Image (spheres, helix red, strand yellow):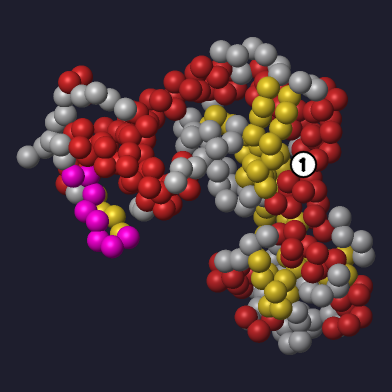
Amino acid sequence: MRICMNWSSIRFDWNQARAFLVTAEEGSLSAAARALDLTQPTLGRQVAALEETLGVQLFDRTGRALQLTRAGLELLEQVRRMGDAAGEFSLVATGQSEAVEGHVTITAGDIFAAYLLPPALTRLAREAPGITVEVVASNAVQNLRRREADIAIRHVRPDQPDLIARKLGEDEARCYATGAYLERYGEPAGPGDLRGAVFAAYEPLDWFLSEVRARGLAMRRENVRVSSGNGVVLMEMIRRGEAIGVLGREIAALIPDARPILPGFSPIPVPSWLVSHRELRTNRRIRLVFDLLARELSG
């Protein structure tokens, strides 16, 4: 039997509902507490208070694991719709602001954030000194709808209908090495013969190996000297002549003496997209930053 709640008769606390929603989506109290920047006991009390208010059990608890009950599953959809509505309300309210002062959060991959974004931020500081910027240097995809960032720079075009994207350009990733590396290790005979070659590779390593092998590079785990999810770390290994790396032209140009090798390796296309929420484009502050980034970063 489907559970229906008369929300008008319940003393509603959005903090409790949000605690339930994020806990259900994250799968544990500890992860939800981190996402909401709360202590785990505080979050647990909010969820328990909601259960008491509604008179239903929302989770089955087995040790540290949480599993939604049937009531929890049915109520989750209602609370999720409420969360979406709250998010839309925030977006529309933000869009009413016509000031060109305030804060903007931009997320971009670590290499992009460290080396390609700063010149654009310098221009922004000259053109709009009243705007402050937080740069979230992360290779993880940030959720624009939940306002984890106002603007994102991504290598994939988003498919959500409420996001807008402008293509900045498309680079190609090839194998690069410095003269110091080639003097020490020599140049590999070809993409199919990497005996003695040393690489710096992206994590997750299985994904990286699959990508380069699909393009004819016979790389094995034994070829990988160091791997990391942080592109700046890998870039430094290449710069020091310790390894070959797969880099885009723009990034490789930042490493003195780096040159492309293994011409038989099929380049990996690396598009860049500037992304924001459609509603936020009506906000002068966000629109100004978005347009400036599009102008400065397009290639």
Q: Vertically, is 39 above or below 97?
A: below
Compared across the picture, whether 261 is left or right of 65 comes to right
Q: Measuring 26% from the left and 37% from the top, which residue is drawn there? A: 49
**Which residue ends up furthest to the bottom in the rendered image?**
195
Which quadrant holds the C terminus? top right
| Number of residue marks | 1
The x, y position of residue 92, in whole percent, is 50, 18
Q: Measuring 60% from the left and 32% from the top, which residue is drawn there? A: 150
Q: Vertically, is 193 above or below 128?
A: below
Residue 62 visible in the shown view:
yes
Compared across the picture, whether 34 is left or right of 109 comes to left
State the residue in front, 176 or 268: 176
Local secondary structure at mark 1:
loop
Judge the density around disc 1: few (<14), some (14-19), many (≥20) Cα neighbours within 10 Å. many
Q: Which quarter of the picture shows residue 88? A: top left
The x, y position of residue 296, in whole percent, is 79, 34
The x, y position of residue 250, in whole percent, is 81, 52
Q: Which quarter of the picture shows residue 22? A: top left
**Residue ID for mark 1:** 117
| Residue 172 belongs to the span the image colors magenta | no
State the extent of the magenta-drawn residues as a range.
Answer: 57-64
Type of amino acid at the residue the image marks with label 1:
Leu
Compared across the picture, whether 216 is left or right of 43 comes to right
Q: Measuring 71% from the left and 78% from the top, which residue is drawn there? A: 225
**Which residue ends up furthest to the left in the rendered image?**
1
Which quadrant holds the N terminus? top left
Q: Vertically, is 89 above or below 83?
A: above
Residue 153 visible in the shown view:
no
State the residue in front, 253 or 36: 36
The x, y position of residue 33, in whole percent, is 43, 47
